[in-house]
Amino acid sequence: MTTIDSQQSLFSAESYFGTQTPPPTLDQDIAGVRSFVHRQRDLGRKVVLVTSGGTTVPLELNVVRFLDNFSAGTRGATSAEYFLKAGYAVIFMHRQFSLQPFSRHYSHSTNPFLDFLEIETTADTPRITATPSKYDHLLEVLTAYKSVQQAGLLHTLTFVTINDYLWLLRAVSQELSVLGRNALYYLAAAVSDFFLPRQKMSEHKIQSGKGSLLIEMDQVPKILQPLIDEWTPDGFIVSFKLETDPALLVPKARGALERYGHHLVIGNDLHRRKYEVVFVSRGHHGSAASDVTAHWLRISADAVDARGHAKEIEEDIVAELSKRHQAWVDGPQPRPPG
Amino acid sequence: MTTIDSQQSLFSAESYFGTQTPPPTLDQDIAGVRSFVHRQRDLGRKVVLVTSGGTTVPLELNVVRFLDNFSAGTRGATSAEYFLKAGYAVIFMHRQFSLQPFSRHYSHSTNPFLDFLEIETTADTPRITATPSKYDHLLEVLTAYKSVQQAGLLHTLTFVTINDYLWLLRAVSQELSVLGRNALYYLAAAVSDFFLPRQKMSEHKIQSGKGSLLIEMDQVPKILQPLIDEWTPDGFIVSFKLETDPALLVPKARGALERYGHHLVIGNDLHRRKYEVVFVSRGHHGSAASDVTAHWLRISADAVDARGHAKEIEEDIVAELSKRHQAWVDGPQPRPPG
């Protein structure tokens, strides 16, 4: 596996959207976002866009095979719950079948909900109820879920492919820009760096034949650039860097910050991501490279929260972010040009 | 994307297992299967191995990116329920996070279970109960689930990568071979045709660099061959063919049947798979190519079952299979050699 140097493979965001086709539900999805955003604006609420889960790169138009990125969506789904607790309205834009806030506690694999429902047959008609040992936790999750639903604080969007993701992100950020500094971007999805343009896909399932398979993919355009510069210039923008080599983590996070000039990169190592993350941002003295600071958040593996549950590092991430976002909202406004 | 001809990329099953490493939980998984199989044998039950969901092909040892095959696991999870109804004990070997029997009715995306639980606050302490409109269906699913659990009829195994799948399949089929003809193989998982040998993987996340990505993968060994010839010669073996080009469906299914000489190939087209499948098998006159028959099963999109629910084609697939499997169990035994 190699990366090869090729001018032809470099798509700008503009050429990407000019040559690839939007997902069929885009207009409908965006109409939903628009009314959600306007309602939150009227109520004076801050809104966070949480992106979560991996994106796929289909290899065929009638897709059977695809390249994928590892992500169950734990970071995004967990953070969304803490953002809701912190008073944010949340647009949860996630990969289909990845974890979601609230239901994440009951993954079909690790904590299947059918196991904590019981059938009481003492009465005339059987009654469905919850297993006593699971009762308190379920009641807590269910109560939070119902209250968020009732208050209309959570809006969910779904993507599958890298193409869905790019079109949705552009359109959602344009809608969110009406909130100015009250919009927070928490871009936790694991987005593919490579894609296969429609024009290069085979129509049907690739036949296995007799030999090996050779795939050549193009680079995904650097979408953060137009997001920051054009689509939502006042939003507070947080991107993520996931690495498996700890030595690369801070340098790569710093590189992203310097390239795009946004507010914050949260770096995490694949194997330590539940226990430590690093906030890489500029200091208070402008954007000189020497002013970049790396602030570590760490919890121990046996930490518990105020309610006695296992502590989740997303609680601390969201607390720190809410503070920084508020400082941005309250900070000096740029002078009007001229 | 192309397939290239290369002798080096052809792994036999033997060279595959000789060069690739088993998943760390293999021994423990197989101990569980062994005791399940022996219990069913003592009770005189037939056992079906259902494989379900897609396999991944990791591109890195510290895996971030992988190639995947499209499969939510609907066929396997649904069929497993009908096999249980038909009196089979089921080993459900599925891709992590793909659909499972019973819980499949409550996908987090399309029918989230938190939406049909309610909190009753009329009593002194709040009570969790089910929404009236969802009650009957939930009670039916929950009753079936609890009774299967209690009777110990369902054993679940999990895989993620193509490597996990291959090692598990070999070991499980060797355990199942003690059942002779009472073992049915329902190989519905969407198994990758290509893989990347450990020896060719990069250790860390591939860096995106400045150009395009080139991946060259080797062919997965044809595992059906040793499964049929060596590991479980008496089992009734059903493989699946998924195609997107309808013209290729029967020819490809027939090709697989002729190549491996097993009992049955079920062909399905990606877009019509909920409404029609084709059973491709040999007729009663030996294995001459001209005796291959294609038997279509079809349901209409608005069909309902005996309970008034939307009809699932897996009900008919399993009914037809149980009949054919029974005929195999009752059929003439091969003469002892010599």
Image (spheres, coloured by chain):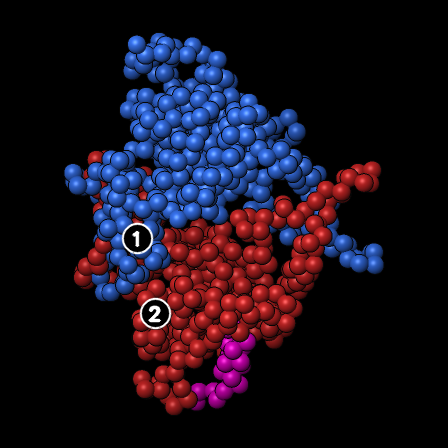
Chain colours: A red, B blue
Report if residue A12 is visible in the image.
Answer: yes
The reply to whether label 1 and label 2 mark residues of one chain is no
* Residue B55 is covered by the magenta coloring: no
Dominant secondary structure (helix, strand or loop) of the stretch shown in magenta: helix
What amino acid is at disc 2?
Answer: Pro
Most foreground residue, B61 or B56: B61
SS type, badge 2 = helix
Residue B291, image quadrant: top left
Residues rendered magenta in the picture: A317-338
Please give the name of the residue rendered at 45% of the width and 16% of the height, measured from the top-left corner.
B328
Neighbour class for label 2 at 10 Å: few (<14), some, many (≥20)?
some
Report the residue at 44% width, 36% height from top: B51
Q: Which mark is residue A246?
A: 2
**Left or right of A302, for residue A202:** left
In the rendered structure, the answer to whether residue A313 lies left or right of residue B70 reads right
Q: Residues within 10 Å of mark 1 (few under 14, many from 20)?
A: many
Residue A147, given in percent of the width and then of the height, sits at 68, 63
Residue marked by disc 1 = B59
Horizontal relation, residue B139 to residue B261: left or right: right
Q: Are marks 1 and 2 in contact (CB under 8 Å)?
A: no
Q: Could one spot residue B274 in this view of the protein? A: no
Element at label 1: loop
Q: CA distance from mark 1 to mark 2?
A: 19 Å
Picture residue at 40% right of the left edge, 39% below the top? B168
Answer above or below: position of A18 versus A301.
above
From the image, state whether disc 1 or disc 2 is nearer to you: 2
Badge 1 amino acid:
Leu
